[in-house]
Amino acid sequence: MLRLIGLLVVVAAAAYFTNPTADAHRTAANEVLRAQADEAANNFDLGGLIQSGAAALTQQGTYETFYVGSKYTVEAAGEPYIECWGAFTQVRCSRSAQASAS
């Protein structure tokens, strides 16, 4: 039992010291926005192109840290558009569920 607790402490410490920065999140979010803009342009989706362009231009992102992980949200028209989650120096971004529904 002591080994398990020790292992959890080591993992938590590693997660704390390798938590991605706001710049890492911003870079990953920009890559997703660029890919979505390219996809919208290829599919002649004017609404998607405008929305992804607006999100890229305004860059109203909010960075939240949870000490062992972090979250970055880019908003478009006041609604979450891209959500990025990060831990252990890795950042994964995707279109938010609210943006996908519209």
Image (cartoon, grey):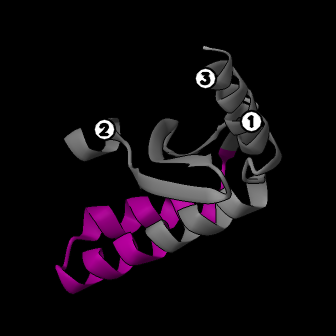
Residue count near mark 3 (Cα–Cα under 10 Å), binned few <14, some 14–19, many ≥20: few
Element class at badge 2: helix
> Which label sits in the foreground, 3 or 2?
3
Distance from Cα at disc 3 to Cα at disc 1: 10 Å
Which corner quadrant holds the C terminus? Answer: top left
**Going by the image, does 10 lie left or right of 75?**
right
Q: Position of residue 99 (x, y in %)?
A: 33, 44
Question: From mark 3 to mark 2, how far is it between C-alphas?
Answer: 36 Å
- The residue positioned 60% from the left and 48% from the top of the image is 86
Task: Please say whether residue 40 is one of the residues in the magenta stretch.
Answer: yes
Q: Decide which of tag 3 and tag 1 comes sooner along the chain.
A: 3
Amino acid beneath label 1: Val
Mark 1 or 2, closer to the camera:
1
* Mark before the other along the chain sequence, 3 or 2: 3
Look at the image and tell me whether residue 17 can be seen. Answer: yes
Task: Look at label 2 and name its amino acid.
Answer: Ala
User: What x and y, as percent, mark residue 31?
Assistant: 52, 73
Which of these two is toward me, 78 or 67?
67
First along the sequence among labels 1 and 2:
1
User: Please, which residue is most extreme toward the right here?
Assistant: 17
Instruction: Residue 4: give its label.
Output: 3
The residue segment tinted magenta is: 33-61
* Magenta stretch holds residue 77: no
59 relative to 3, above or below:
below
